[in-house]
Image: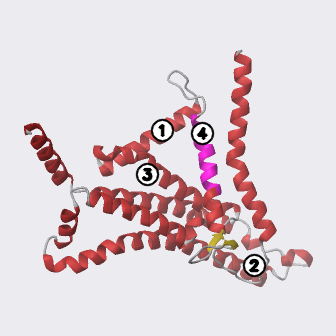
Amino acid sequence: MQQKNSIRFRIVDFLLILMMIIPVTVLIVVKLLTNVPAEGISVTGAKIYFEISMPFQNLLITESQINSWMVMISITGLCLYLTHGIGVKVKNRRQHLAEWIVEKTDNLVKGNMGEYFMAFSPFIGAILGLSAFSSLICLFGLYSPTSDINVVGGWAILTFILITYYKSKCGPWVYIKSFGDPVTLLAPLNIISEVATPISMAFRHYGNVLSGSVISVLLAAGLQGLSSMVLGWLPGVLGDIPFLQIGIPAVLSIYFDVFSGCLQAFIFAMLTMLYVSGAFPMEEYFKRKKKKQTKAMSN
């Protein structure tokens, strides 16, 4: 019975590993089949695969959307793999890793948002994972969804909805009155600041990731030209090999793709936590809640 359970366990593990690998493999194959070679430097946006007819405007299915869904499938497979076979007594490396991720995310939320917002841990963990992995797939030569303003803009709008929801927890009048703090004359500026929040979040993330991709392409092209200029005198095929492109772009990629991508994911998650928790009038909320409870008990 234990052997059967062990075999079944390994089969499930294997299927979960495939769930992590297959989406990225499919994206690489699709990229190779649909990629059109371009001469010189080429920096383009997400490809449009097809359109779906809609009443007001056609829905475009783009490379960034497909890549986002594939990243989410891979992350889901990773989460299921890390938690497969988890238990109170069972302790293995993957369980230790899963517990470490949960513990660090909880501490991050608790330290920046407080005890009241501990239920935000899964949401913040999802933002960190999705943003980081969406940026890191460019290491496989794939289009990064975080290089698309539409994708990052959607995340920023979701954060803005949460900010507005928690600002309105004390009622619409308290929310409207907050635009007049500290002086009523500053209301127009506060309204502009409110609208600018999701815009700044989206453009900060999108701009940093896209600029890293553009700089990487420009440096690779420059190194190719420099290699041809400096080492083009080598005889035969050796003169055509871009030796300066070997290794140097990979080192630069550690910053522009790995470090910068993970850093932007962390910054976006931090801004989400700070904006949401800072928008919530906690003292006013609990004061009103206590007043309602007292009134209900007296009745």
User: Residue placed farthest to the top in the image?
Assistant: 1
Image quadrant assignment for residue 220: bottom right
Q: Are marks 2 and 3 in contact (CB under 8 Å)?
A: no
Element at label 4: helix
Q: Is residue 77 left or right of residue 274?
A: right
Q: In the image shown, does 88 or 250 lie closer to the viewer?
A: 88
Q: Which residue in the structure is indicated by mark 4?
A: 80
- Residue at image x 11%, y 37%? 297
Q: Is residue 2 left or right of residue 273?
A: right
The CA distance from mark 3 to mark 1 is 15 Å
Task: Specify the segment rendered in magenta.
Answer: 70-83
Instruction: Inspect the image, locate mark 3, and give the three-letter code of the amino acid beneath it.
Output: Ile
Q: In the image shown, does 220 or 41 lie closer to the viewer?
A: 41
The CA distance from mark 3 to mark 4 is 18 Å
Q: Which residue in the structure is indicated by mark 3?
A: 124
The CA distance from mark 2 to mark 3 is 45 Å
Instruction: Inspect the image, locate mark 1, and give the three-letter code of the amino acid beneath it.
Output: Trp
Q: Magenta stretch: dominant SS?
A: helix
Q: Looking at the image, is mark 4 or mark 2 earlier in the sequence?
A: 4
Instruction: Inspect the image, locate mark 2, and give the three-letter code of the amino acid beneath it.
Output: Ser
Q: In the image shown, does 288 or 178 lie closer to the viewer?
A: 288
Callout 2 crowding tier (Cα within 10 Å): few <14, some 14–19, many ≥20? some
- Residue at image x 72%, y 37%? 14
Q: Looking at the image, is mark 2 or mark 3 earlier in the sequence?
A: 3
Q: Which residue in the structure is indicated by mark 1?
A: 100
Say whether residue 93 is visible. yes
Q: Which mark is residue 227?
A: 2
Element at label 1: helix
